[in-house]
Image (tube, grey):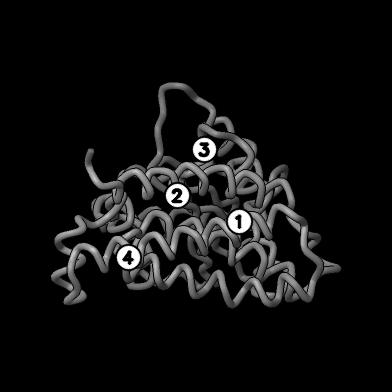
Amino acid sequence: MHILLAEDDKTSRELLRRILEAETHTVDLAKDGEEAWKSLEAPSRRFDVCVFDICMPSISGIDLLERMRAKDAHRRIPVILCTALNDRTTVQRAAALGVTHFVVKPYSRTLMRDKLEQIRAAIEGAPEAEEPAFVCRRLGIDADTHREMIESLLADAHECAELLRANPDLPALQKLLMRLRGIKGSCLTLGMPQVAEQFRLLKDLIDAHVADPAAMPYPEAKIAALLAELDARLAQAAARIKTPA
């Protein structure tokens, strides 16, 4: 994979470069956040993964992540944040911004390899949806039962989406978290990994807000963007189960 590595400490940057290149990845280096952002914006470059140190001058790793999630061209790039800090506020902010993985220093070749393999598997192996026939065989159900279960799940998913659009208060959000977890699991069981991923992202955002509302205000704009994408994925899922005319 093509990786953008941003680390302001020269020794740490060189160590991590060697770890990544030993796993046959191509690595572009940036000595701070400003240089990393210029690399991301360069039209001739495309990165599969970004690895950022959090504490960097000019633009921090978390600030870089926030910029990326706000821009369509970079929103979907997986990001690993590396830091010596593991305080609750830092972790919560990273989770709310949709960080892919969070690694606490010192670096470990085994840990970095495992995180990157998880990302590679997600990029290469996650289909939009499993074939209905495969899901039926896996679960031991017939096509009609599968269709009924999908229809029920989609109805529940739409209801949760509407509740989120209503800007619920904290007690309502706490109740919604349980439903979001359940829907995510059901989506995976019924062969809809991409829909499950949208619910995971929503759950992580709300989880961070519920854990500490003062430090993490309700991320209305980010939730709205995720809900818009969820609507499209739910419509695709509904279209797949329609009985041919």
Residue 12 visible at all = no
Residue identified by numbered label 1: 161
Helix, strand or loop at disc 3? loop
Ranked by sequence position, the earlier of labels 1 and 4 is 4
**What residue lies at 23% left-to-right and 57% top-to-bottom?**
130
Residue identified by numbered label 2: 234
Q: Tell me the CA gap for discs 4 and 3.
A: 23 Å
Q: Tell me the CA gap for discs 2 and 1.
A: 11 Å
1 and 4 marks in contact (CB < 8 Å): no
Left or right relative to 29: residue 160: right
Towards the viewer: 2 or 78: 78
2 and 1 marks in contact (CB < 8 Å): yes
Residue identified by numbered label 3: 74
Q: Tell me the CA gap for discs 1 and 4.
A: 36 Å
Q: From what the image shows, is residue 152 above or below residue 86?
A: above
**What residue lies at 39% left-to-right and 59% top-to-bottom?**
151
Ranked by sequence position, the earlier of labels 2 and 1 is 1
